[in-house]
Amino acid sequence: MTTRSRISSLRFSTPLLLLLPLSCSSGSDRKAELAQHYVEVLHATYTDAEAGAEELDQAITAFCDAPSASGLEHCREVWIQARLSYQQTEISRFYEGPIDRAPDGPEGFINAWPVDESHLRAIIADATAFPTIDATTLREANESGGEENIATGWHAIEYLLWGEDLRSDGPGERDWQDFQDGGPLPHPDRRRQVLRVASGILVADLRQVRLEWENAYRDEFLAAGADESLRRILTGVGTLVKGELYGERLVVPWSSKSQGDEHSCFADTTHLDHLHDMIGVRNAWTGSFRSERDDRLLEGPGLRDLARGADAARADRIDALIERAIRLMESRAFRPFDQAILGADNAPGRVAVQEAISALAELSTELTGLADDLDVAVSMELPE
Amino acid sequence: MSPSKGGQRSRTLLGLALALAGCGAPEAPEAPVVPAGGATTVVNTSAKAFAQPAPNFSQERLIDHFVGNALFNKNWVAAPAQAERLDGLGPLFNARSCSTCHFRDGRGAPPAPGEPAVALLFKVGTRSAEGAGTDAPDEVYGSQFQNFAIAGAQAEGSVEIDYAERAGSYADGTAYALRAPRYLPAEPGYGPFSDALFLTPRIAPAVFGVGLLEGIPEDDLLARADPDDADGDGISGRVSYVTDMASGETVVGRFGWKAGQPTVDRQVAAALLGDMGISSSLVGGVQNHGPRQAVLDELPTGGTPEIDDVDLERLSFYMRTLGVPARRKPRDPGVRRGAELFESVGCNACHVPVQRTLEVAGMPELSDQSFAPYTDLLLHDMGDELSDDRPEGDASGREWRTPPLWGIGLIEVVNDHQELLHDGRARGVAEAILWHGGEGAAARDAFRALSTAERADLVAFVEDL
């Protein structure tokens, strides 16, 4: 398979980069080396995410062809595993790269949330409004009539695989027979069809993004100039930390105590989403990427190398904050996340989430400072 | 960090950004372009360009912004429901969530043929015995037409929309076409429509920047008003005086197509009630149906009020703290020519480029800002063609509040259309200008007299906002 050869070529290129003595190269060269390695890391991460989605698609196809309890369980396991890679790609959002560039960046088809499950239920039940269920109709139905009306992507599939999470001690308990003709719910055929189509869309969209990171966008990114590449890298990491992870994924559920505000509310894997977003941040920061699929390792320059040259104390603080956030997200208190956010503010879960929120607030201040140190005008700054 | 220090840092960065960008010959110095949202300006040209938090708010200050954002996107459900915080939809409604119509905090469009109207809602007007349009509520259908209802209730009806194409031509002979809409109520849910009843459309506008608009000193609005056209320039903007829904006092209106609401929280409360059927303390906990729809009284509500004051304030705070998208290419030669034409044609008489805030209580980030909304927030007579024949508060049927133009060029990116004016009848900037009448007629005629290249420059300028 072509993936293998690509990986080995990456392995050759990485030591070469490491041989370059960072301290002796000019600032511009160091930024160029950082950009070069960053595209390798993003390409590898998307390659893993796409491979995970393909594996999921195969599992879903097999399950829909012959529904069974073990088939559904297998789909769920593959979904959870595939998400670990996908979340690490989220550092490449927010600077109008292949994932979210207007007008055709597919992010909204891939990872939109939260899901109002009644929208998917309506699509499945309403054969008049949705006589055929194919990629076109499902894409049209996605975000139709509201930002929670999600019909495609990881979280639509998550709802289909798990169903509503009504338990305090575990995820949703969808009955595999919901997908079987003659099962307890009406429209098993349409439910299977939505699942198959959504899964196919996910593979197609991730492939499109991976190919861009392999070819056109990779070239454009590297040709954009070292400062522009650095601006994008910092914008992606900074916005993920400041807006998405801090705000939408932690502050909102912490504040509302509502399961409906957690990222993967059906599968109860929200803590893994947070953790692997942060691991993506760490990948860009340290330059070290370890595959979730085959343990392969890519090493090269990271933002940290530039940061140390500008302000070593700040670099140490960022190091510590990233590790602190990761340790909290790995901790027992963080899961299941829908329980962690409940209770009094001194309950272990809420303390842990609050500490992670504080760490990310500090981290985002430090990243803004880093952008200043490196003379990069990240997207939050004023234009003329 | 103090605002002034932030400003200095930003200017330094900006110099660097320009240095990075400037590969060509250095340009002659010129007056700086006022950033669209002052210190709240966001550089973002993606589909989420309207949905970014203002960059000058601290992480801690943005907590309510993020919570408000989640609430803005939430689908409300009929009561009673497990999600108690979000129950109370309807019984009559136009939309289940704020984001249904203000998708990605942006602008709605009229429905495609055969589709139900979603982001285009209709106010109900009634005609007097003499045939004059009034905003007196219809005794059955009230003052807003809701085309959806929760289970167990009947929608008020649907709306048939027809467009008649109308041909015209510019002074240089280039042809154009406008589409003139007609709106008829259909499928009555609560008995036949009275002959006196008529509908008037309102498209959902983008919601960013409203904190700045709210902060423009009242004296600045009054200073621009010229109700009797004392200066004889043909422009007679009026301040909209409205009755505050909570206090009953007469106050200056700023929000809504006819400046019917004075503040963001009042606008939010009015939209929650009228569009979604969500009661709040500001509207006294009342529901959005009338005495002749008593069958709806039997249905459970989501409490009194259905949204609490904390969540109501979060929604308002969310919109006040959205960043305003930066212009994309203010230095482009065609755009700069267009900016000059915008002035010489006279658009800026009402679409006033620059406004300011002084101290905004509780909002240091919005205080002492210069920004560029391109509105005077005043009511102007826009002529018969745009008249909806329905007065609202202080505004006559012919009068509309000057809508801000900031972000107009990004609607295409965010919302995938460019359908402008209060009902989305204009397909792009040029058609919107051509629909101007009344006080806008002179500017419209001046636009029609421009050459093709000049018109393209003017449109390019507006689309850069």
Image (tube, coloured by chain):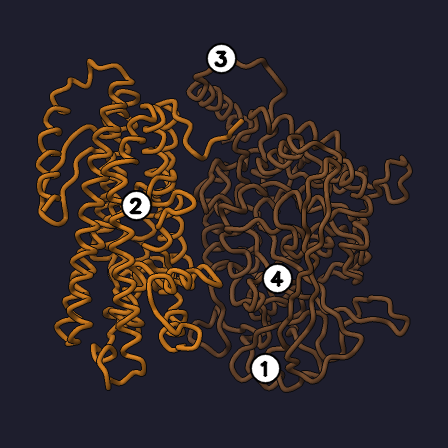
**Picture disc at residue A90:** 2
Nearest to N terminus: mark 3 or mark 1: 3
- Where does residue B412 sit, x and y in percent of width and height? 52, 46
Residue carrying label 1? B154
Between circles 1 and 4, the one closer to the viewer is 4
What chain is colored orange? A
* Three-letter amino acid code at the position of disc 1: Gln
Distance of mark 4 from mark 2, alpha carbons? 35 Å
Q: Is residue A312 visible?
A: no
Q: Which residue is drawn at 13% across and 36% down?
A: A298
Q: Is residue B201 above or below residue A51?
A: below
For label 3, count other residues whose C-alpha is less than 10 Å away and answer few (under 14), some (14-19) or many (20+).
few
Q: In this view, does A178 lie to the left or right of B30?
A: left
Between circles 4 and 2, the one closer to the viewer is 4
**Picture disc at residue A166:** none
* Three-letter amino acid code at the position of disc 3: Ala
Q: Do the CB atoms of the residues marked 4 and 3 lie less than 8 Å apart?
A: no
- Where does residue B266 sit, x and y in percent of width and height? 66, 58
Between circles 2 and 3, the one closer to the viewer is 3
Residue carrying label 4? B120
Q: Which residue is drawn at 20% across and 57% down?
A: A332
Nearest to the observer: residue B261 or residue B153: B153
Q: Mark 1 lies on which chain?
A: B
Disc 3 element: loop
For label 1, count other residues whose C-alpha is less than 10 Å away and answer few (under 14), some (14-19) or many (20+).
some
Distance of mark 1 from mark 4, alpha carbons? 20 Å
